[in-house]
Amino acid sequence: MTIQNSTNGIPAGFGERLKRERKRLGFSQESFAQIGGVQRLAQIQYENENTAPTTKYLNLIKIAGADLSYLLLGIDSSLGSVSPERMEIIKDKTFELIEKFAENTATTKFSPETYKMLFNLIHGILIQVEKGTLPKEIDILSLVNQGK
C-alpha cells in the first residue's frame, strides 16, 4: 500500500476525508473548527489541503469521534469483530511500534499530542490487519513515515 502525497506533504485526499468525517459526525465547519481549537478559516484550509493540521487539532477531533486512520491513510479503523483479548495484544503492539518509530526518527521524545496521534494511527492500522482488511506483512512504520 502506498500513500500519495500532494505537493505540500498532506496525504492526497485528506481534505475530502476530513470533510466527510465532519459531516458524518454532524458538525458544521465552524463547530468542527471550534472542537479542533482553530478558526473556521483553518478548517477550510485543512479541507482544501492548503494547510496541514497540527497534532493538537487531530487529537481534539479524535476525541469528538473522528477516525484518524481514515483521515490520514484512508483506512477505516472501526473495531468490528475484534475480541477484547486481541485488542489487548493490539494495544501492546501499538506501544512497541511507537517505541520503534521513535528510535528511527531524529526525535525520540514526542509531545503528548504527537504520541496520542501516533497511538491512534498505528492502533487503527493494527485493527485493520487483525480484521484482515490489510495484509499481515504490511510495514506499518514505513506507512506511518509516508503519512507524516
Image (cartoon, rainbow, N blue to C red):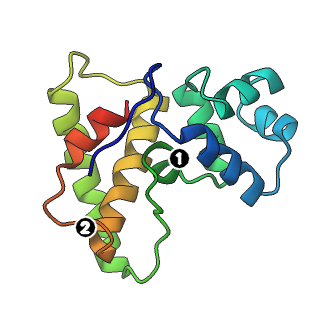
Q: How many marks?
A: 2
What residue do we see at 28% from left, 45% from top?
2
Give how far apart the Cα atoms at labels 2 and 1 are.
24 Å
Can you give x and y, in whole percent of width and height, for residue 135 in the image? 21, 66
Residue linked to disc 2: 89
**The C terminus sits in image quarter:** top left
Labelled pair 2, 1 in contact (Cβ < 8 Å): no
Frontmost residue, 40 versus 89: 40
What residue do we see at 65% from left, 55% from top?
65
User: Which labelled disc corresponds to residue 71?
Assistant: 1
- Label 1 packing within 10 angstroms: few (<14), some (14-19), many (20+): many
Disc 1 secondary structure class? helix
Can you give x and y, in whole percent of width and height, for residue 104 in the image? 15, 27
Frontmost residue, 2 versus 97: 2
- Label 2 packing within 10 angstroms: few (<14), some (14-19), many (20+): few
Q: Amino acid at mark 1?
A: Leu
What residue do we see at 37% from left, 78% from top?
84
Can you give x and y, in whole percent of width and height, for residue 5 in the image? 40, 31
What residue do we see at 50% from left, 68% from top?
78
Side of 10 relative to 38 (left or right): left
Among numbered discs 2 and 1, the one appearing first in the sequence:
1
Q: Is residue 70 above or below residue 103?
A: below
Quarter occupied by residue 146 = top left
Frontmost residue, 22 versus 61: 22
Frontmost residue, 63 versus 38: 38
Q: Is residue 113 above or below residue 62?
A: above
Can you give x and y, in whole percent of width and height, for residue 35 in the image? 76, 38
Quarter occupied by residue 32 = top right
